Amino acid sequence: MSDLILTPNIDDADDFYADLLAAHEGLEKTDSDALNARLVLVLANHIGDRSVLTQAIRAATLADE
């Protein structure tokens, strides 16, 4: 079982964020939401570890509180 990494772990994080914003540029809300959903599924598939994905869902849910 792996643990979810919650500390900064993205090379060139600012560039990644700029790429993410650029991907959403000009999209309607529904298209932007659909892009986010596809991205989540692509990344979840890449991670592949169900326990890590469960930890990620819990961490994201707690972030709203």
Image: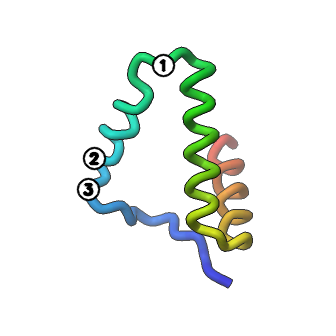
Q: Quadrant of the N terminus?
A: bottom right
In the image, what residue type sits under mark 2?
Asp
Residue 14 marker: 2
Q: What distance separates the C-alpha of mark 1 from that of mark 2? A: 21 Å
Res. 45 image quadrant: bottom right
Element type where label 1 sits in the image: loop
Residue 27 marker: 1
Closer to viewer: mark 1 or mark 2: 1
Residue 12 marker: 3
Q: Quadrant of the C terminus?
A: top right
Residue 13's place in the image compared with 30, above or below, is below
User: Is disc 3 in contact with disc 2, using a CB cutoff of under 8 Å?
Assistant: yes
Closer to viewer: mark 1 or mark 3: 1
Q: What distance separates the C-alpha of mark 1 from that of mark 3? A: 25 Å
Element type where label 3 sits in the image: loop
Horizontal arrangement in the rendering, residue 45 relative to residue 50 (left or right): left
Horizontal arrangement in the rendering, residue 6 relative to residue 9 (left or right): right
Residue 59's place in the image compared with 35, above or below, is below
Please report whichever mark, 1 or 3, sits nearer to the chain's N-terminal start.
Answer: 3
Element type where label 2 sits in the image: helix
In the image, what residue type sits under mark 1?
Leu
